Image: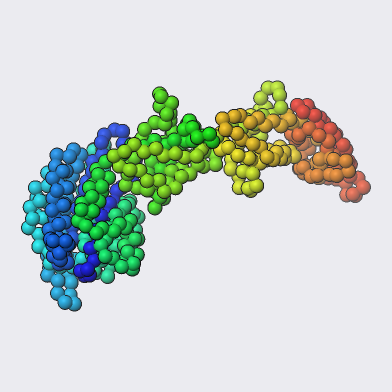
Amino acid sequence: MRRHLLPLLLLLAFPALRAQDRSVQPPLTRMLFVMDASNSMNAFWGDKPKIATARELLLKSLKELEGQPDLELALRLYGHQTHIQPGKQDCDDTRLEVPFSTNSIPAMRATLQQVRCLGTTPIARSLEKAATDFPPVDRNDKRTVRNVIILITDGIEACDEDPCAVSRALQARGIVLKPFVIGVGLTDNDRYNLQCVGNYFDASTPELFEHVLQVVVTQALNTTTAQVSLMTEDGKPTETDVAVTFYDQRTGAARYHFMHTLNDRGIPDTLLIDPVYTYKVVAHTLPPSVREDVKVRPGMHNIIAVDAGMGTLHLKVGSGPPDAHTIMCIVRRKGEMITLHAQEMGTTQRYRTGTYDLEVLTLPRTLIPDVRIEQGRTTDVAIPRPGVLNVQPARPGPGSIFQKEGDKLTWVADLDPAASRWQYRLQPGNYQVIYRSGSARRTEFSITKDVVIESGRSTTVTF
């Protein structure tokens, strides 16, 4: 054990909250204190042994937690059963001393008053076992259960094990760790070793530890309020009716899903958000509107602004009655080849403001570049109604349809050589059909016919 170190590692672990359950009942919080009682806790910090200061501040916190509704507490100690000896240490010296209950504070107080600091610092093993201290969730209890671990230690891992690996394993089992690391006199290397477990803070006084402990307990007990303001280009929080997801920034796990709403006063509705996580907030606009590294402050109303200015694209097909045939339009951001959306002609869709390239899947394809979507406005894009080309040969045979521009031919489609009739919906324009009967074995028997396709009309070519 390295006695010159005084990190106070406060490790919080929460299972995923389900947004749809949070309005049913207040969550049940289970808070497990994992307390370092190793031999190094006998060393002085200021004018008192470290164990005395930590015990005094923890007991003060427990007093403030008495009578707290929807709260169960438990206490695990480590390093308190086996005397440390030169060249020998007991890395299994960790035990749940006070199990979870709604009235565990008296037992925790008595245990802390009597604890003797004897052994080593098995942080990884204590965390691993602590994950099993939480009772299974009662299926009949409709409340959300929030499992919280607060680990208080005065040193780094002493048993050649890896707390970071334990953290990853707990995450894989559905427990997400949110650590707060406070250290005094740590070397750069020691800080680096702790960064994979949590967020590092430097504490120089017991008063700072007291403050951080209060912050952590507050975050552990409470959700806080927030609103997501979807901002227009002119800075107004009036965009709405968009699905929004809150992801854990560190792990990528989804924490909340909801459909954004403006309340009766025309402002974004208030949400209850767990302040422990750092979030990646994604408004599922087209394309998505994303804000990274969002932190919410407990006990306050947080406004999370996301740039999400939108306009509407209305795709139309000529005039007249609706066309019974579906024509799709590929929408891409200007200069990008990735398909953003396939929108059906005759529909409207909201997009982020900006410039887009459209590719309408007509025959032949219709390319419409540089379509501008503006804030709060509808952009109309129309294509002519197609016409119908009927090809009726005397006998089946191979052939092709070409778009004709002067002497230039551009392939449009092949005829099915096994079919006796063909029908194609083509955009208005000039075309040429080249055909040869399947029974004709000489190229000179090929037949070429020009045809003009008019919008909304049917044209028949016979061979």
167 sits to left or right of 374: left
Give percent across and percent down for residue 59: 13, 50
- Does residue 189 show up? yes
161 sits to left or right of 420: left
| Front residue of this view, candidates 400 and 416 | 400
Residue at the top extreme of this rendering? 320
Q: Quadrant of the C terminus?
A: top right
Give percent across and percent down for residue 127: 25, 58
Q: Quadrant of the N terminus?
A: bottom left
**What is the image's colouring?**
rainbow
Q: Which corner quadrant of the image does residue 404 belong to? A: top right
Give percent across and percent down for residue 142: 26, 37
Residue at the right extreme of this rendering? 444
Q: Residue at x 39, y 35 (%)?
A: 227
Give percent across and percent down for residue 365: 72, 40
| Front residue of this view, candidates 161 and 459 | 161
Q: Which corner quadrant of the image does residue 323 belong to? A: top right
Q: Residue at x 90, y 49 (%)?
A: 442
- Does residue 95 show up? no
Residue at the bottom extreme of this rendering? 87
Q: Which corner quadrant of the image does residue 166 belong to? A: bottom left
Residue 195 against residue 160 in the figure, above or below: above
| Front residue of this view, candidates 260 and 448 | 260
| Front residue of this view, candidates 1 and 284 | 1
Q: Residue at x 42, y 46 (%)?
A: 280
